[in-house]
């Protein structure tokens, strides 16, 4: 699978819980995800973020919304 296909998968799988939990439209949820630091990290092939489940990526996005830094997520905090 190439990076574009991986990102497409995560776009759908992470935007859905954003939509469900925060009541944003599908497009707004997708934009919120794609305009995040979490997405920038996911799109960086050197970080290999696709090792994380979509729910872990959602957690990183949600932590970013609260703290401004996805690295505060429990999934990344202990990895440093």
Image (tube, grey):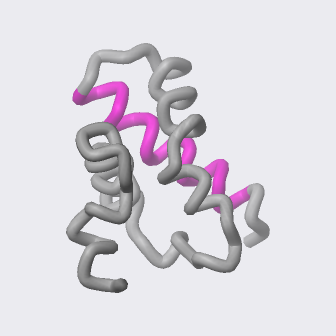
Quadrant for the C terminus, please: bottom left
Q: Looking at the picture, how far across and down is residue 72, in whole percent?
A: 27, 62
Determine whether 67 is above or below 30 in the image. Answer: below
Quadrant for the N terminus, please: bottom right
Q: Is residue 7 magenta?
A: yes
**Span shown in magenta:** 5-21
In the image, is 51 to the left or to the right of 18?
right
In the image, is 23 to the left or to the right of 28?
left
Q: Residue at coordinates 39% horizontally, 58% vertically from top-left? A: 57
Q: Residue at coordinates 35% horizontally, 33% vertically from top-left? A: 18
Q: Residue at coordinates 34% horizontally, 47% vertically from top-left? A: 64
What secondary structure predominates along the stretch shown in magenta? helix
Q: Looking at the picture, how far across and down is residue 11, in whole percent?
A: 56, 44
- State the image quarter where residue 7 is shown: bottom right
As rendered, which of 65 and 28 lies closer to the eye?
A: 65
Determine whether 35 is above or below 48 in the image. Answer: above
Q: Residue at coordinates 36% horizontally, 26% vertically from top-left? A: 19
As rendered, which of 26 and 28 lies closer to the eye?
A: 28
């Amino acid at each position: 699978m190439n990076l574009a296909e991986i990102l497409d998968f995560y776009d759908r799988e992470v935007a859905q819980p954003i939509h469900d939990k925060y009541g944003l439209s599908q497009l707004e949820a997708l934009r919120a995800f794609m305009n995040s630091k979490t997405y920038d990290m996911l799109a960086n092939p050197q970080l290999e973020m696709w090792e994380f489940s979509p729910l872990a990526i959602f957690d990183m996005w949600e932590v970013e919304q609260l703290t401004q830094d996805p690295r505060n997520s429990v999934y990344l905090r202990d990895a440093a």
